Image: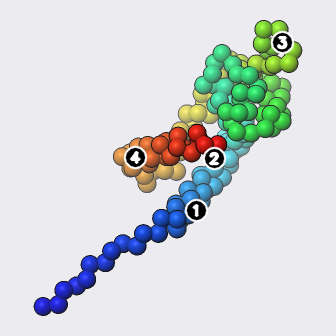
Amino acid sequence: MTATPVETPKVETSKDRLRLWVRLLRATRVIEGDLRLRLISQFNTTLPRFDVMAALFRQPEGMLMSDLSRFLLVSNGNVTGIVDRLVEDGFVQRSRRDGDRRTSMVQLTDAGQELFREMATAHEGWIDELLRGVSAADAQALAGMLKSFRSEWEDHH
């Protein structure tokens, strides 16, 4: 009787993490590209505009421009241009905080809230469609893993 050797799995931690990063990046790029096309074709808007409106929707009382750019992880200049166009379109309003001319609060108008609700409903459906191959249990597990990962590295940067 000849015993078959049991293979021990290789431990390639850094390579495994690199492969994970590449897969996450590819998935993000594919999904983001699809979302960009859908937002422009169905709502004549861009993903950055959607992101600004989403952040403001979560804060109905409004946000300081500096807090908005920090939340979105983009420069003040990038946010200012997007907010300017949203103001022109009637979806966002600016106000001064406590009369301070240096600080600007921004918040969604009623029209902005209505538009964002429509876009958010469509967006949720698109994501559900694009990730239909991921079970609810796997989605919850992966989201939990990524949440703990986020809290681990966010504190260091």
In percent of the image, x 44 and y 43: which residue is there? 144
> Which residue position holds label 2?
35
Whole-angstrom CA distance, mark 2 to mark 1, is 20 Å
> Which residue position holds label 4?
141
Checking the image for residue 100, the label placed there is: 3
Of the residues shown, which amino acid type is indicated by label 2? Leu
The residue mark sitting in front, 2 or 1, is: 1
> Which residue position holds label 1?
22
The answer to which of marks 2 and 4 sits earlier in the sequence is 2
Whole-angstrom CA distance, mark 3 to mark 1, is 46 Å
Residue density around tag 1, few if under 14, some if 14–19, many if 20 or more, within 10 Å: few
Checking the image for residue 156, the label placed there is: none
- Circles 2 and 1 in contact, beta carbons < 8 Å: no
- The single residue placed furthest to the left in the displayed view is 1
In percent of the image, x 76 and y 19: which residue is there? 105
Of the residues shown, which amino acid type is indicated by label 1? Val
Q: How far across and down, in percent of the image, does residue 18 sit?
A: 56, 63
